[in-house]
Image (spheres, helix red, strand yellow):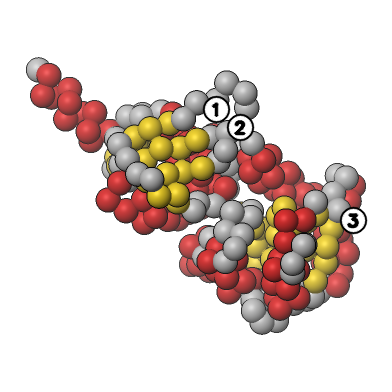
Amino acid sequence: MCILVADDDPVVREVVRRYLERDGRTVLETGDGRAAHAALTRVGEPDQVELAVLDVMMPEPNGIELCRAIRAGDRPHIPIILLTALGDEDDRILGLEAGADDYVTKPFSPRELALRVASVLRRARGVPVGDQEPLCAGPVTVHPSAQVVLVGDMPMSLTPREFDLLVFLLRNPGRVFSRESLLEQVWGWDFGDLSTVTVHIKRLRAKLGAHHRIDTVWGRGYAWGRTEITAERLDAR
């Protein structure tokens, strides 16, 4: 298994590779989006890439375009981290909406990127023993150990972060979590851009459609099924 690092700057690739190799990881380097896409789709090789680090500004397809292609292709679940020199919040949100699990803004600390890689992989690889019972909410069923989401009998494709967020909310129905709290408990970050949470909530709602029960509690945060639980309590009075 290896980490794909796609960036048109050979110095960036070399620095990232050295830091990832210090953590015992194997790195596959490419200098543009086309080569990166080929590495992910070549017969016999795609399953060897367990996470992709993509530069937003690399030659075509750029990181955001490639991210969209991956999410719409044969390996929609592969974790993706974007490297971006674009500091504007709208640009970061664009990357998250394309399906990225995380992003790191240039110039960046290589050690921070290595830690982000470790964090995303840790959450993508599995669920602790004892947390593997299926979770059900109406027609939505989640099998944490297999990382499978069903709506009725139909499987649903979620990114690793979307999956983590859904599992967390389903395990805590009715409880309100601020964006800061979700960033810490789902992403494992002590600090970060709160729009990351906002975009993932939006994407999760869109994918679940009419079956989502993610309520916005204004001024406080988000909760799964809070409106329904409150209604039940009122009816019981």
Q: For the point 41% across and 37% down, which residue is it?
A: 141
One can see residue 201 in this view: no
| Above-or-below relation of 132 to 183 | above
Q: Earlier in the sequence, mark 3 or mark 2?
A: 3
Considering only order in the chain, which callout, 1 or 3, is on the residue closer to the N terminus?
3
Looking at the picture, tell me which residue is in the foreground, 48 or 13.
Answer: 48
* Local secondary structure at mark 1: loop
For the point 22% across and 33% down, the residue is: 228
Q: Amino acid at mark 1?
A: Gln
Name the residue located 37 percent from the left edge and 40 percent from the top edge: 140
In the image, is 11 to the left or to the right of 136? right
* Label 2 with label 1: CB-CB less than 8 Å: yes
Q: Position of residue 38 (x, y in %)?
A: 73, 73
Q: CA distance from mark 3 to mark 2?
A: 29 Å
Q: Earlier in the sequence, mark 2 or mark 1?
A: 2
Could you tell me the amino acid type at mark 3? Arg
User: Element type at marker 3?
Assistant: helix
The Cα–Cα distance between marks 2 and 1, rounded to whole angstroms, is 7 Å
| Crowd class of label 3 (few under 14; some 14 to 19; many from 20; radius 10 Å) | some
Across and down, in percent, residue 203 comes to: 42, 55
Q: Which residue is mark 1?
A: 132
Q: Position of residue 4 (x, y in %)?
A: 76, 61
The residue lying at 66 percent from left, 82 percent from top is 60
Q: Which residue carries the number 3 mark?
A: 18
78 left or right, relative to 137: right
